[in-house]
């Protein structure tokens, strides 16, 4: 869970961290009183949104020469003028995306005489399984450029949880930040405070950028960004009270109500998966075939019908979604429960985009039966590659000058292929042969004997697009040549390409379940 800067400073101040005086406001009418309550004469007017890079941001409603989301004011009147331009307008930063975020809160803060800007953050370092300080003498708005161009200027100090921040750790931090005198003395107090705040409130990340050395030699937390471990919020009702739902995606809020792990993304293929690892792999599969996932959504191992229905509703609420892929491996989760949830959701909200459901595991036969007998336009896929290779074919043949016609037979039943339907032109016939249930897939194609080089180029491009490596090349009696490619995995796909005197044959095959 994220909170605003002013809230983060309140939390840190409660632990004794040095922060400037400031007042949060939600309307222009409150700005004058807020500014007059501060020492002045310098004030800082800060947009409060859940995104970084506010100072470099631009307001959509203002001209290109307008100032960003963090502004200095040298009088109360100037602070009010800034507030009028900022409140209610949309701030676009490097972290918000082009849509930006509406500024509904401002933080009027007392100014500071800055001598140096430093960077200091705390996070859980997964390499060590411990909390670590990440610090740099190059703080400020360009820290991302520092990390990219000069990573050696960023240092990491890992803290032993058994001891907490020791004098030796403080000495390392002071050295890394080039602190001396009063600043070093302040560091001796501040760094243990930050560590305690991080641990006691179950933070996931604490970023202070900048941590400043003022002209009087003292340290001050000038900006703070904090996120908390959502799994630990039950221990902190005071932190939960800081939540600002207006800064969150409505779909993510709805997902949290149903205990769904959901993150909205920028793609157009919605996906629902059980298990975070499988969800990541499924998103990789979507990207492999040239599309972008619209979300991460893990329904978990113990989802019920209602939970699945809620998940489906959340996916379909995204107007960017052009297709939905449900990929479930049922261990604890039963495939029939998933199927019932999907059917219930489709009946309730309707289906305006293609839906492919791939089920494996516990009660898979019953789950597929529920889908197939639902009377709904749901594709129950046995194999993801068979139903997702269309774009790979399109790319492979795009520049070949070949215009294939494809007819398909599946399990002995003639009809157009779902994923090859775009090849309905002249010159080629491909047949997906009927197969016993024990065979995952066997696809056989007979192609028109037009120039062999054209077909060879197209098929080689297809093999490359499908991440397949050549495994054999040989001469066959009665044929000019034969080439094979293969993709790894537990049930690898093989592609076999034969150029005959009067025909070109391409076969795509997977071995039987349990085969080699």
Image: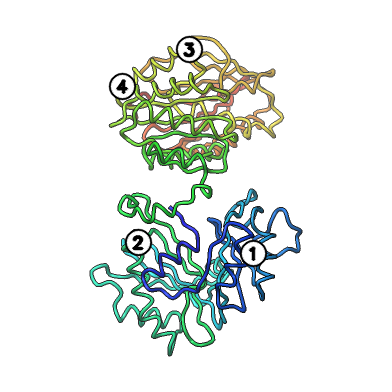
Answer with left or right where residue 269 lies relative to residue 397: left
Q: CA distance from mark 3 to mark 1?
A: 54 Å
Residue holding disc 4: 363
* Disc on the earlier residue, 3 or 1: 1
Of the two numbered discs 1 and 4 in the rendering, the one whose residue sits closer to the viewer: 1
* Disc on the earlier residue, 2 or 4: 2
Residue holding disc 1: 56
Rendering coords of residue 269 (x, y %): 54, 34
Q: CA distance from mark 1 to mark 4?
A: 54 Å
Q: Quadrant of the C terminus?
A: top left
Q: Is residue 49 visible?
A: yes
Closest to the observer, 203 or 508 = 203
Q: CA distance from mark 2 to mark 1?
A: 32 Å
Q: Is residue 482 visible?
A: no
Quarter of the rendering containing residue 52? bottom right
Residue holding disc 3: 375
In the displayed structure, would residue 414 be above or below residue 392?
above
Answer with left or right where residue 157 lies relative to residue 118: left
Label 2 neighbourhood size at 10 Å, few (<14), some (14-19), many (20+)?
A: few
Label 1 neighbourhood size at 10 Å, few (<14), some (14-19), many (20+)?
A: some
At horizontal 61% and vertical 20% (from top left) the residue drawn is 421
In the displayed structure, would residue 297 be above or below residue 334?
below
Of the two numbered discs 4 and 3 in the rendering, the one whose residue sits closer to the viewer: 3
Of the two numbered discs 3 and 1 in the rendering, the one whose residue sits closer to the viewer: 1
* Disc on the earlier residue, 2 or 1: 1
Of the two numbered discs 2 and 1 in the rendering, the one whose residue sits closer to the viewer: 1
Q: Secondary structure at mark 2?
A: loop
Q: CA distance from mark 2 to mark 3?
A: 50 Å
């Amino acid at each position: 869970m994220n909170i605003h800067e002013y809230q983060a400073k309140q939390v840190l101040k409660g632990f004794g961290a040095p922060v400037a005086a400031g007042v949060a406001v939600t309307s222009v009418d409150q700005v004058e009183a807020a500014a007059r309550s501060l020492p002045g004469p310098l004030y800082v007017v800060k947009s409060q949104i859940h995104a970084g890079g506010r100072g470099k941001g631009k307001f959509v409603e203002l001209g290109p020469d307008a100032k960003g989301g963090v502004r200095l004011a040298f009088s109360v009147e100037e602070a009010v003028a800034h507030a009028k331009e900022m409140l209610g307008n949309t701030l676009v930063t490097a972290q918000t995306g082009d849509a930006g975020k509406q500024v509904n809160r401002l933080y009027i803060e007392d100014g500071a005489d800055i001598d140096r800007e430093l960077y200091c953050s705390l996070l859980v370092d997964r390499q060590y399984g411990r909390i670590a300080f990440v610090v740099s003498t190059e703080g400020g708005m360009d820290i991302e450029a520092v990390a990219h161009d000069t990573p050696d200027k960023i240092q990491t100090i890992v803290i032993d949880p058994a001891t907490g921040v020791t004098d030796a750790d403080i000495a390392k931090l002071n050295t890394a930040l080039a602190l001396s005198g009063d600043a070093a003395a302040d560091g001796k107090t501040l760094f243990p405070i930050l560590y305690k705040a991080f641990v006691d409130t179950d933070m996931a990340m604490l970023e202070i950028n900048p941590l400043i050395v003022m002209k009087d030699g003292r340290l001050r937390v000038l900006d703070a960004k904090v996120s908390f471990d959502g799994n630990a919020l039950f221990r902190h009702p005071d932190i939960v009270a800081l939540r600002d739902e207006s800064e969150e995606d409505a779909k993510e809020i709805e997902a949290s109500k149903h205990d769904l792990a959901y993150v909205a993304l920028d793609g157009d293929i919605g996906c629902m998966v059980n298990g975070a690892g499988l969800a990541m792999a499924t998103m990789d599969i979507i990207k492999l075939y040239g599309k972008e996932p619209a979300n991460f959504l893990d329904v978990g191992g113990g989802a019920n019908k209602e939970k699945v229905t809620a998940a489906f509703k959340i996916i379909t609420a995204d107007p960017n979604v052009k297709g939905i892929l449900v990929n479930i491996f049922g261990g604890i989760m039963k495939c029939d429960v998933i199927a019932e949830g999907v059917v219930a959701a489709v009946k309730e909200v309707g289906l305006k985009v293609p839906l492919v459901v791939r089920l494996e595991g516990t009660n898979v036969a019953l789950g597929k039966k529920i889908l197939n007998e639902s009377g709904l336009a749901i594709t129950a896929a046995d194999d993801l590659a068979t139903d997702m290779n269309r774009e790979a074919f399109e790319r492979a043949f795009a520049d070949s000058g070949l215009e294939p016609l494809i007819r398909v037979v599946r399990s002995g039943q003639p009809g157009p292929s779902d994923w090859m339907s775009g090849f309905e032109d002249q010159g080629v016939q491909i047949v997906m042969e009927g197969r016993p249930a024990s065979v995952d897939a066997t696809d056989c194609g007979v192609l028109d004997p037009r120039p062999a080089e054209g077909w060879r180029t197209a098929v080689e491009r297809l093999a490359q697009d499908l991440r397949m490596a050549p495994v054999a090349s040989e001469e066959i009696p009665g044929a000019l040549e034969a080439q094979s490619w293969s993709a790894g995995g537990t049930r690898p796909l093989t592609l076999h390409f034969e150029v005959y005197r009067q025909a070109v044959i391409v076969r795509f095959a997977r071995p039987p379940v349990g085969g080699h």
